[in-house]
Image (tube, rainbow, N blue to C red):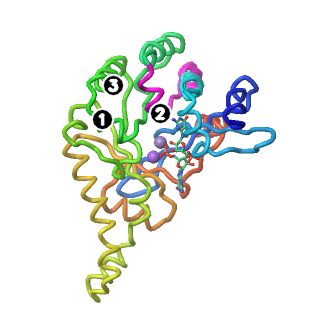
Amino acid sequence: TRMEQALRHALSRQQLSVHLQPQFMLPATGAPYLVAAEALLRWNDPTLGNVSPATFIPIAEESGLIVELGHWVLEQVCMALADMTVKGRTLPMAVNVSQVQFRNADFVPRVASLLKRHIFSSDLLRIELTESLASEDEDDVLDKIDQLAALGLSFSIDDFGIGYSNLARLRRMPLSELKIDRSFINDLVSESDVVDARVHSVPGKVVVSHGNEIVRAMLVMAQALSLEVVAEGVEEEYQLEVLRQLGCQRVQGFLLGRPQPMEKLIQAFEARE
Ligand code: G
Ligand code: G
Ligand code: MN
Ligand code: NA
């Protein structure tokens, strides 16, 4: 297709860039503070304009191009981590890795080679995998995760809660983090609405309040699995406050920070005291 063709040339024509979205620690009291960043691929085509990864990632997966695109993103992040290491101020970074890329036979050796060429503490690099990959019953996937974990990388499960995770399998993986899918954050209600619902027993509101209970249950489950939790897609102040009350320690979303050009976020981070 035309888009596949255009995407094939995007890399060589420097139409791709990596954005970073900040991730924050949410203390029990006080302001959230930056603790990590997620790398997100952006494509600006001269005729198509900005194409969303939601559109081009599936095309890249079907055509196999994702292997090279994904590797390029990983390399940009490794370069940034090495740069920051030289300057003495590091920030952990997460990269989304597609199933197609992860399953490629060369994935582990190519990551190992990146780690050799770019000098930084490998625990700064985190890989976000989808829940579906984490639930497939293949020893090959588990082996690769173990090999990469042995190199020092950490893993998180992205969009958690909307797929079919196999909890027994999750428990066997060396994971560090679950990222609660933004649909659950969208279903949170402010504490006053929950109280209101209990007092007045408005049927609609009682049902809605379950959004908070589901996130609470996810936090309990994550704790049982010794996993950190990131709430994704936080857009509203009340969502942040509900998450704080529930004890969710990490948050990401438009309310606190949008994805921005890599250099911009790094400069802002380095300029901080
Ligand atoms: O950044 P945005 O919300 O538009 O991303 C849309 C989707 O594309 C998300 O599911 C996101 O995980 C995915 N995505 C963004 N960048 C990358 C990338 O570098 N690799 C992969 N595999 N997926 C990405
Ligand atoms: O699937 P994944 O979680 O990797 O998707 C990340 C994408 O989610 C990013 O491309 C980013 O643009 C988008 N995103 C980040 N924060 C928010 C938010 O607060 N609201 C919405 N709707 N999307 C967000
Ligand atoms: Mn992600
Ligand atoms: Na996600």
What is the span of residues highlighted in magenta in the rendered image? 79-104
Evaluate if marks 2 and 1 touch, with contact meaning CB atoms under 8 Å apart: no
C-alpha distance separating marks 2 and 3: 14 Å
Question: Callout 3 environment at 10 Å: few (<14), some (14 to 19), or many (20+)?
Answer: many
| As drawn, 99 above or below 140 | below
C-alpha distance separating marks 1 and 3: 13 Å
The residue to which callout 3 is attached is 145
| As drawn, 104 above or below 246 | above
- Answer with mark 2 or mark 1, whichever residue precedes in sequence: 2
Q: Judge whether residue 80 is colored magenta.
A: yes
Mark 1: amino acid: Glu
Q: Identify the residue shown where x is 48% and y is 50%.
A: 252
**Observer able to see residue 142:** yes
- Please state which of the two labelled residues, at mark 2 or mark 3, is closer to the viewer: 2
Q: Identify the residue shown where x is 34% and y is 40%.
A: 177
- Answer with mark 2 or mark 3, whichever residue precedes in sequence: 2
Question: Callout 2 environment at 10 Å: few (<14), some (14 to 19), or many (20+)?
Answer: many
Left-right relation of 130 to 91: left
Q: Is mark 3 within 8 Å of ligand 1?
A: no
C-alpha distance separating marks 2 and 1: 14 Å
Residue 178, labelled with which disc?
Answer: none
- Please state which of the two labelled residues, at mark 2 or mark 1, is closer to the viewer: 1
The residue to which callout 2 is attached is 98
| Image coords of residue 167 (percent x, y) | 22, 43
Mark 2: amino acid: Ser
Mark 3: amino acid: Ile
Q: Identify the residue shown where x is 48% and y is 47%.
A: 33
Q: Identify the residue shown where x is 38% and y is 60%.
A: 184
Q: Is mark 2 within 8 Å of ligand 1?
A: yes
The residue to which callout 1 is attached is 136
